[in-house]
């Protein structure tokens, strides 16, 4: 009958970003013609999709104003976290509100002139930049009385649009699917500019998780210590619960071991940054001759 090894938060390896866990055997154990498998993984979905460590947390918006017209650049650094596109759009609106670059229509609703949305039919993310009026529409008001267009004035020559800038370093565009440049390239438009991502967007850089194990000798993988992989099957902040319908046993290298160590990597074998180590991983080990 297979032997069970349980790994939990008490086994986390210090300074490993909660990605490495080590279970020390009670005594050195010899493995010969043995196999190992994962029976269950329960862990919080706690890794961020936008962080300074991933260098994907910055962008800017350039807003026109005045008779020239002139522009004001708002540089935005996103706090480390997990963000949906809807939340990123709300964050953009937050900065427009904070800087006074929005209007309030006659119904009392805020009006913004730039947005992020999904274009699902094109499998792209879309930036919409709407023409900004040259004067305050009847019954409308400035969003702020102390900043932005209220103090700097709307541009008065002709309608223009704002621009989104994705920098060459630390760019939000790297996961939204936009190369490092300015969208649109000029603000001199009098019609709505809808710009699609020019590379494939990937708002969740960690699409699947690979489990490595020091006991394993997997001849079919470049990384011979590859044991298992899974895809997060829940939303951020909830528990991932993976239970293979059938155990897939991998050979253990013959030898004497003092511990079992596992490590989580992303689908490209890159290091992960896991925030919450409160997990349970159940290993099954078949010693020689066990069924």
Image: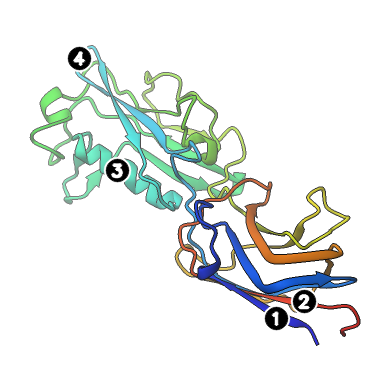
Quadrant of the image occupied by residue 188: top left
Q: Are marks 1 and 2 in contact (CB under 8 Å)?
A: yes
Q: Nearer the viewer, residue 216 or 63?
A: 216
Residue receiving disc 1? 4
Disc with the residue nearer the chain's start (2 vs 4): 4
Measure the C-alpha gap from mark 1 to mark 4. 74 Å
> Is 177 drawn above or below residue 157 in the view shown?
below
Mark 4 element type: loop
Residue receiving disc 3? 93
Q: Nearer the viewer, residue 239 or 100?
A: 239
Question: Left or right: where does residue 106 sit relative to residue 170?
Answer: left
Disc with the residue nearer the chain's start (1 vs 2): 1
Judging from the image, the colouring scheme is rainbow
The location of residue 115, given as percent across then percent down, is 38, 41
Measure the C-alpha gap from mark 4 to mark 3. 24 Å
Measure the C-alpha gap from mark 3 to mark 1. 52 Å
Quadrant of the image occupied by residue 136: top left
What's the mark number on residue 285? 2
The location of residue 172, given as percent across then percent down, is 46, 37
Furthest residue in direction left, as rendered: 145
Q: Nearer the viewer, mark 3 or mark 2?
A: 2
Q: Are marks 1 and 4 in contact (CB under 8 Å)?
A: no
The location of residue 97, given as percent across then percent down, is 22, 41
Disc with the residue nearer the chain's start (4 vs 3): 4
Q: Let me know if residue 208 appears in the view.
A: no
């Amino acid at each position: 009958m297979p032997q069970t090894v349980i790994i939990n938060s008490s086994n986390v390896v210090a300074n490993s970003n909660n990605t490495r866990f080590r279970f020390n055997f009670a005594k050195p154990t010899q493995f010969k013609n043995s196999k190992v498998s994962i029976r269950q993984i329960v862990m919080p979905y706690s890794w961020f999709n936008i962080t300074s460590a991933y260098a994907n947390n910055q962008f800017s918006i350039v807003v026109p104003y005045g008779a020239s017209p002139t522009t004001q650049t708002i540089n935005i650094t996103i706090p480390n976290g997990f963000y949906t596109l809807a939340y990123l759009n709300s964050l953009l609106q937050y900065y427009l509100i904070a800087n006074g670059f929005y209007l309030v229509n006659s119904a009392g609703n805020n009006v913004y002139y730039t947005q992020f949305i999904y274009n699902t039919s094109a499998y792209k993310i879309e930036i919409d930049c709407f023409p900004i009026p040259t004067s305050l529409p009847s019954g409308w008001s400035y969003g702020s009385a102390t900043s932005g267009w209220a103090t700097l004035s709307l541009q008065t020559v002709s309608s223009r649009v704002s621009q989104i800038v994705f920098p060459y370093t630390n760019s939000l565009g790297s996961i939204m699917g936009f190369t490092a440049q300015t969208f649109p390239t000029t603000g001199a438009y009098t019609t709505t500019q809808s710009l699609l991502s020019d590379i494939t967007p990937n708002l969740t850089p960690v699409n699947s998780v690979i489990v490595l194990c020091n006991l394993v000798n997997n001849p079919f993988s470049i990384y011979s210590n590859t044991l298992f992989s899974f895809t997060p099957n829940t939303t951020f902040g909830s528990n991932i619960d993976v239970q293979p319908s059938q155990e897939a046993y991998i050979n253990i290298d013959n030898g004497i071991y003092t511990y079992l160590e596992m490590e989580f990597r992303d689908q490209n074998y890159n290091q992960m940054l896991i925030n919450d180590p409160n997990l349970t991983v159940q290993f099954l080990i078949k010693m020689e001759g066990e069924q």
